[in-house]
Image: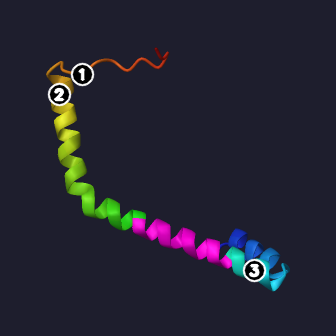
Amino acid sequence: MTTMLQQAFQAASRLPDAEQDVLAARLLAEISAEDEFDRKIAQTSDKLAILSAEALAEHRAGLTLPFDDAGP
């Protein structure tokens, strides 16, 4: 466990029980969301590679427009 996480847990341990439970639920939800995101990315990596190759081919064929960061 990192020093920063240890400090966060120490600080959280001083909160009232109800607030600790809320914080714990939020942390667990965040970890779960990160795990789900990683699984989704892993499941779609082949699709992303295909789309990337298609986009690069379109660019090389001159079928794309330059990005104008100045807006409309």
Q: Which residues are magenta?
A: 24-36
Residue type pointed to by label 2? Glu
Q: How is the image coloured?
A: rainbow
Question: Would residue 2 be found to the left or right of residue 66 on screen?
Answer: right
> Vertical placement of 68 versus 33: above or below?
above
Rendering coords of residue 70 (x, y %)? 49, 15
Tell me the quarter of the picture where residue 29 sits.
bottom right
Q: Nearer the viewer, residue 53 or 32?
A: 32
Q: Few, some or many C-alpha atoms within 10 Å of disc 3 (few <14, some 14-19, many ≥20)?
A: some
Magenta region includes residue 35: yes
Question: Would residue 22 be found to the left or right of residue 59 on screen?
Answer: right
Q: Which residue is mark 3?
A: 20
Q: Secondary structure at mark 1?
A: loop
Q: CA distance from mark 1 to mark 3?
A: 52 Å
Q: Which residue is mark 2?
A: 58
Q: Secondary structure at mark 2?
A: helix
Circle on res. 64: 1
The reply to whether dot 1 and dot 2 touch (C-beta < 8 Å) is yes
Residue type pointed to by label 1? Thr
